[in-house]
Image (cartoon, helix red, strand yellow):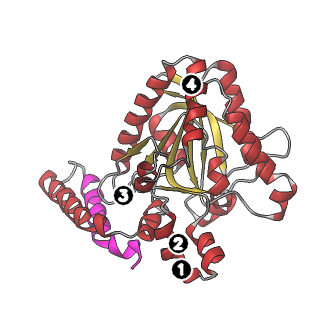
Amino acid sequence: MDFYKLEEKIIRHKEEIEKLQQEDDGGDKTRIAELKTAIEKEWADLRPRLTAHQIVQVARHPQRPYTLDYIQALTEDFMEMHGDRRAGDDPAIVCGFAFFNGQSTAFIGHQKGRTTRERIARNFGQPNPEGYRKALRVMKLAEKFGFPIVTLIDTPGAYPGIRAEELGQAEAIAHNLKEIAKLKVPVVNLVIGEGGSGGALAVGVGDVLLMLQNSFYSVISPEGCAAILWKDQTAVAKAAENMKFLASNLDEMGIVDKIIPEPPGGAHVDIDRTFKEVGKQLKKTLDELMSKPVSQLLDERYEKYRKIGIFNEE
């Protein structure tokens, strides 16, 4: 069963809470507390039973907060930068500078869009090469002035169209991997939804990898995996189960550095609480990284990626 069916009771409670909170007196506090408790109980029963494919649906939930939502909630005076100075501007990637806890910080992330019109304009969060080159341009600018960098990852993957290939999609991704690895400022990567393939990794190299509890990070989407290995789109659930790409799986393998808890029902059910948890963890992580000398940052970043994929079998 789809997650969207399973969450119907939670969504009804959420909508009632929002309706009560919009009342002039802030609503019936006792009733709001009861509804929040009901959501917690429903989620405590539902969450352990969710399959990998259903958690993928949570990560892709259309009401889940996107990059611009986090930027608006957590920063001040965001100034967006446009264009890669070569081919054009890619709306699928948002880049710019803002104050985060009083510190000038570069924020870079995928943006999917809410409405159909916005999703088409943003190419459903699938960047073209100019998007990755724009991201690197802003990262280099941040390095020049000593600003830390935060990337927010939420994409099904890089755009696979002919024009993207003609403009050097693979080269743009590979170039970013090499250049970001050498940046002399702290880089924090945060997976807020789906981290798909090289489209995510192109802005996903850094010192610390954070993941929201119901996000995933993978070399390919479960749909792509099902098409290649099973040649059958009905095998998507099987692919998701076998890929081991959830935050909990990556934590066990030592790939993710910290899992940020989500409120009962997922990030979309209590967005303010999600922002609070993300802001708290980002501040803690950046404070720790900013205290390290550049040589230590670069050495630890190198070792971090060298260790991925190394396993000892008894």
* Magenta highlight: main SS: helix
Vertical side of 293 occupied by 75: above or below: below
Say whether disc 4 or disc 1 marks the residue closer to the N-terminus.
Answer: 1
Indicate the position of residue 309 as horizontal and vertical percent values: 56, 49
Whether tag 4 and tag 3 are in contact, CB under 8 A, the answer is no
SS for callout 3: loop
Whether tag 2 and tag 1 are in contact, CB under 8 A, the answer is yes
Q: Which mark is residue 266?
A: 3
Give the amino acid type for the residue marked by disc 1 in the picture. Answer: Ala
Q: CA distance from mark 3 to mark 2?
A: 22 Å
Q: CA distance from mark 4 to mark 2?
A: 36 Å
Task: Specify the segment rendered in magenta.
Answer: 1-23
Q: CA distance from mark 4 to mark 1?
A: 42 Å
Residue 282 is drawn in which quadrant? top left
Say whether disc 1 or disc 3 marks the residue closer to the N-terminus.
Answer: 1
- Mark 4 or 3: in front is 4
| Horizontal side, residue 6 vs residue 180: left or right | left
| Horizontal side, residue 203 vs residue 52: left or right | right
Task: Report the front residue among 287 and 314.
Answer: 314
Question: Residue under circle 1?
Answer: 235
Q: Which mark is residue 239?
A: 2
Whether tag 4 and tag 1 are in contact, CB under 8 A, the answer is no
Question: Residue under circle 4?
Answer: 297
